[in-house]
Amino acid sequence: MGALAQVVAVRLRSPAILLLLLMGILAGPVMRKFFPDSSLAIDPDHLLKDLLNPIVGLSVGMILYEGGLTLRVRELRTGAKVITMLVTVGAFVTWLLATLAGVLIMKLPWGLALVFGAILTVTGPTVILPLVQYMRPKGATGPILRWEGIVIDPIGALLAVLVFEAVRAGGATSAANDVFYGVITTIIVGGGLGVVSGWLMTTIIKNYLVPDYLQNAVSFAMVVVTFALCDSVQKESGLLATTVMGVYLANQKSADVEHILEFKENLRVLLISSLFVVLAARLDLDEFRALGWSSVAFVAVLILVVRPVAVMCSTLGSRLNWRERALLASMAPRGIVAAAITPVLAFDLADRFPEQSSRIVPLMFAVIIGTVTFYSVVAPLIARLLKLADTNPQGVL
C-alpha cells in the first residue's frame, strides 16, 4: 500500500504523505467501521502489540540519521544565525502560541496543551525535503528550511518529553529539576554518543575494517544500537544521537559515505511509506469527527499566525529580505515525528487527563493533513510569485 501511494504521488506530482494517510485511514478505521467482521482491516496494535512503539521510534531515528547525512556545514555560511534562531526562539514562540491556541480554541487543559504545543514545535523533514527539492528555492532559504526541518525534530521531541515529565511531576521545583537534568543528560549522552558513533563508523570505512558490501549493514546496526542506548538513559535522546551521527558522517573528509547515503535514502522511503499507513490505521473516525470545526480554526491559526510570528521573531536583524522571510513563513508542515510522538505521550497522560488526552491524537493528524495540504499547494506558488523559485535550472552537466 505504501509503495502504491508513493508511485501514484509521483504521477500526480503531489506529496506522498497525503496518499499514505488516506491509504492508512481506508485500510484501518474505515474498514473497521463499515466492515467490522472483515479480517482485511489493519489493526497495528493487534498486529505489533508491544513492538509498535519501539519499531516506530527506531524508524524515526533512522529517518533523522538519513536527514543528517544530507546536511553540509558549508551551507551554514549564510544562514547559521537564522537556523539557530528558528530552532530556539522560533521553537519557543511556536510552543507558547500553540499552547494558547490549544487552550482557547480546543479547550484543552493547560498541562495537556503545554505538552501538545511542545510537540507542534517539530516540523516535518519527510515533507519539507521533497517540497524544497520540488520548489528549488534560490539563495539561503533552501538550506535554512532543510537544516531547520531536520534539526528541530530532536529538539522538539526532547522539549515535548521534558514538558511531559514536568506536567506529570506537578511541583514547580521538581519539574524544573527534571527539565534541567533532562537537557544536560540529552546533550551529553545523545550528542556525545552520536559523535562517537559517527567517528567509529568513519574509522571502519576509512580503514576497511569491514568489506564494502557490509558497510550499509554495519551502519544500520550502529544507528539502532546508538538509538537504543541513548533512549535507555534519556527518553527521545536517541533522535538527537542519530541526527548528530548523520551530520558527523556527512561533514568528515576521510571516508566516502555516498553509498551509505544512497542506501538510507531508499530505506527512508520504505520506512515512511510503512509508518504513515500504520499510524493512520490506528485512528478512530468517531474521535476525528468529534473535533468539529474548532480543529479547522486551530490549524488555520498555526498556519496564519503561529508560523509567521515565529519566523518574524527569528529573523529580526538578519540579512534576509522580506521575500525570503515570507517564503520561510509559508513552510511548516508537520510530519512523521509529530505523528509518532503524540500517541505515546497521549497514552502516558491518560491517567492525568482521562477525558481529554485521547483528543490530541486525532487533532495531530488533522494538523498534519491540514498543514501538508496547505503548504504543498501554497508554498510553491509563493516561491514563484516572489521569484525565489528556480523554475528552469540550466547549468553545466
Image (tube, rainbow, N blue to C red):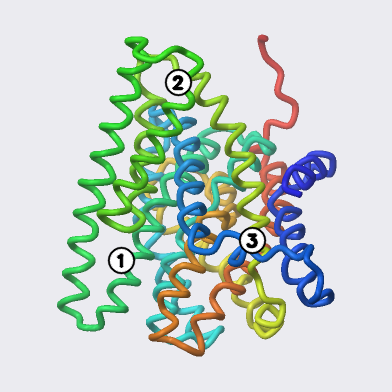
Is the Cβ of the residue at disc 3 closer than 8 Å to that at disc 1?
no
Name the residue carrying label 2: 215
- Marks 1 and 2: which is nearer the front? 2
> Which one is nearer the viewer's eye here, 114 or 40?
40
Tag 3: Cα neighbours inside 10 Å, few (<14), some, or many (≥20)? many
Q: Which mark is residue 371?
A: 3
Which residue is rendered at x = 64% and y = 35% of the image?
133
Give x and y (percent) for residue 230: 30, 48
Against 270, residue 275 (above or below) is below
What amino acid does circle 2 point to? Gln
Residue 293 seen: no
Residue type beneath disc 1: Leu
Residue 63 coordinates in the image, percent (x, y): 51, 42
Question: From the viewer's perspective, is 226 left or right of 10?
Answer: left
Distance from the alpha carbon under mark 2 to that under mark 3: 38 Å
- Across and down, in percent, residue 249 comes to 38, 26
**Mark 2 or mark 1, which is nearer the start of the sequence?**
1
Res 190 label: none
Q: Determine whether 374 is above or below 299 in the image.
A: above
The answer to whether mark 2 and mark 3 are in CB contact below 8 A is no
